[in-house]
Image: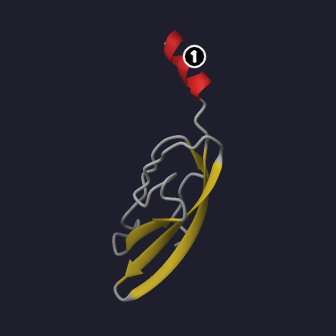
């Protein structure tokens, strides 16, 4: 559980692990805002910065534990996106 970590903020899809580093545990994820960050880590950038709670359920045999993370999904700025596209 302590070894499990994910970024604190993102603008891109997250790679959420589905097995523990030991290989003996499985991890499933749930999001309190799946329209912003889905249970599989897909990010849909909101119009303003949004904090999302992602909960990992860690299973080893018949034992379960959870760990909750708060991840900030950074806002989509259309003007900055268009400006970047013009100059790239």
- On screen, residue 88 above or below 38: above
Please state if 33 lies on the left or on the right of 18 as rendered: right
Viewer-proximal residue among 61 and 3? 61
Local packing at callout 1 (Cα closer than 10 Å; few below 14, some 14-19, many 20+) is: few
- On screen, residue 53 above or below 42: below
Residue at 43% x, 50% y: name it: 42
Residue at 53% x, 56% y: name it: 6
Q: Position of residue 70 (x, y in %)?
A: 62, 60
| View extreme (top): residue | 87
- On screen, residue 79 above or below 70: above
Residue at 61% x, 42% y: name it: 74
Q: Position of residue 56 (x, y in %)?
A: 48, 69
- On screen, residue 59 above or below 19: below
Quadrant in the picture for residue 23: bottom left
Residue at 55% x, 24% y: name it: 81
Viewer-proximal residue among 36 and 88? 36
Please state if 4 lies on the left or on the right of 80 as rendered: left
Q: Position of residue 49 (x, y in %)?
A: 65, 45
Which residue is the site of mark 1?
A: 83
Q: Position of residue 24 (x, y in %)?
A: 34, 75
Residue at disc 1, secondary structure: helix
Q: How many marks?
A: 1
């Amino acid at each position: 559980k302590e070894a499990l970590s994910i970024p604190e903020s993102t603008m891109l899809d997250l790679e959420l692990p589905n097995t523990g580093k030991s290989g003996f545990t499985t991890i499933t994820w749930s999001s309190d805002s799946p329209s912003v960050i889905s249970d599989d880590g897909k990010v849909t950038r909101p119009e303003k910065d949004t904090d999302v709670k992602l909960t990992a359920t860690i299973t080893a045999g018949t034992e379960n534990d959870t760990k909750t993370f708060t991840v900030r999904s950074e806002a989509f700025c259309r003007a900055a996106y268009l400006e970047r596209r013009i100059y790239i």
